Image: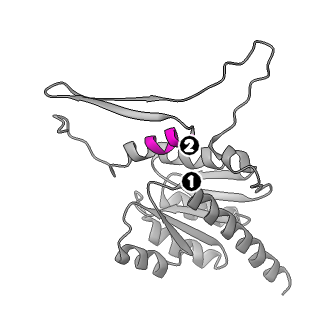
Amino acid sequence: MASPYNSSGTGLGLPICKGLVDLLKGNIWFDSQPDKGTSFYFSIPYLEASPNEQSYTSGLSSSFPNLNFKGKKILVVEDDLFSFQFIEALLQNTNAKIIHAKNGEDAVEISSIASDIDLVIMDICLPFLDGCEATIQIKKQNPKICVIAQTANVHNNDRARCMRAGCDDYIAKPLDPDEFLRLVAHYLKKAEANRHSLSDH
């Protein structure tokens, strides 16, 4: 529905919201009326805890109970706070340490200081220094580090640009949780193998 307000962004807000609601086994719907606008609603199931029951936060990654990334450091390069929080929620129960960089320049600086980062999740569309250029600089510092690009543009040219920059893989936005966690697990294992190969020389 047309809006009288100017807006900008990738247009991913609603797909991400739907992804969150689906993960929580809920429903999302909307009501649209001419000249009034569109309202969105959602419902999620929950169990009411007794006063004596200990509360806890399960996190979105509770569907993947066997993933344990304890001792692993993941640098998430994402300028959009909501998108970062979505990734953080997916990784919440994996025991990984999450480091957040809000732009490409910060990512390059952090990776130069923290040489023990195991994996970089790199948004390609970033302010100041885009994700491809940031990846090139990070790979110069540490050629063995694994980088997964995330982008809303999934055309072949964009994919090829990511790979030329040195990205090991890519995933489309909005993120599919299963695919995202599969890639993270795969490249953390590869990062560990790379680290062992370096220590053997």
Residue 126: percent from the left, percent from the top? 42, 58
Query: How dense is the environment of label 2, judged by Cα within 10 Å: few (below 14), some, or many (20 and up)?
Result: some
Residue lying furthest top? 51
The correct choice, above or below, for 127 with respect to 142 in the image is above
Task: State the SS at label 2.
Answer: helix
Q: What element carries label 1?
A: helix
Extreme-right residue of the structure: 200
Determine crowd level at label 1: few under 14, some 14-19, many 20+ residues with C-alpha closer than 10 A: many
Q: Are marks 2 and 1 in contact (CB under 8 Å)?
A: yes
Residue 22 within the magenta-colored segment of the rendering: yes
- 176 drawn magenta: no
Q: Quadrant of residue 47?
A: top right
Q: In this view, does 73 lie to the left or right of 140?
A: right
Mark number for residue 177? Answer: 1
Relative placement, left or right, of 78 versus 199 is left
Numbered circle sitting on residue 23: 2
Residue 179 in sight here:
yes
Give amino acid for label 1: Pro
Q: Which numbered tag is attached to residue 74?
A: none
Residue at the spot x=84%, y=80% of the render? 199
Q: In this view, does 112 lie to the left or right of 86?
A: right
